[in-house]
Image (spheres, rainbow, N blue to C red):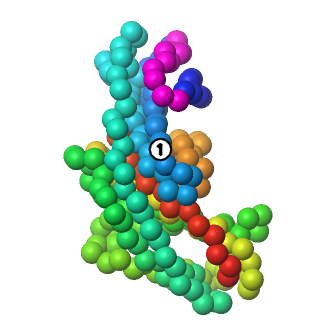
Amino acid sequence: MNLATWGNGSQSVARPTNLVAGDLFQFWTCHGPPFARCCGILRKDALDPMVAPGSNFFLPVVPNLFLTVNQTHSANSLPTFTFSTTGSSSTGLSPLGHALFLAEPGVRYWRHFVSAGALGGAANYYVDVESASGFSGIIPGSGASVQLNATIFFGDKPLGALFAARPIPEETHTAHTLFLDRMLPVRLEAFFFSSSFTW
């Protein structure tokens, strides 16, 4: 439930009654153009003193980190993705991984999460799920317009703790944050990349 939306400055946030431990307040802030946004996401347990009635706090400033993702593909295979970044996340946050989203709008959609551990020191990533039984239909048709969204995440909780938590029903940022939208108090930074290309 969205309780408040604002731009610069401060604003009071409505506080529902009958909150219990495990309920969350989520705050987020973004800057930059839609194809290269830099976003901070802060989730706090409803009983945390930081969000007690009458309390005040400021969202941390999100640094500039720019994610670039290039792709190469053949007519019958999903792309190989190449990641590069300039800039850095906030001090104290650890890399969690990349989320990938490919869409042939209205026809087919493909999502994948690559943990920092799975990627290791490599800059390239390829998953050949199209060769698995029943998955051939995820390949766009020749000449199709395809949307690519990618996100790199940093956080103050281990990835395993996030994945173990219950999912939040809606994405905080559509087509970018599905994998880490979880019912867990956490501080995240997410840096977006978007582009389109012809298959």
x%, y% of residue 21? 40, 23
Asked if the stretch drawn in magenta spans residue 86, the answer is no
Looking at the image, which residue sits at the far top? 54
Q: Nearer the viewer, residue 10 or 74?
A: 10
Using the image, determine if residue 121 lies above or below residue 39: below
Q: Residues within 10 Å of mark 1 (few under 14, many from 20)?
A: some
The magenta-colored residue range is 7-17
Q: Say which residue label 1 marks.
A: 31
Left or right for 77, reference 163: right
138 or 31: which is nearer to us? 31
- State the residue at coordinates (57%, 27%): 5
Between 181 and 163, the one nearer to me in the picture: 181
Look at 32% across and 78% down and name the residue there: 122
Which image quadrant: the N terminus? top right
The amino acid type found where label 1 is placed reads His
Answer left or right for 47 relative to 198: left
Quadrant the C terminus occupies: bottom right
Q: Which is the main secondary structure of the residues drawn in magenta?
A: loop
Is residue 55 something that shows in the picture? yes
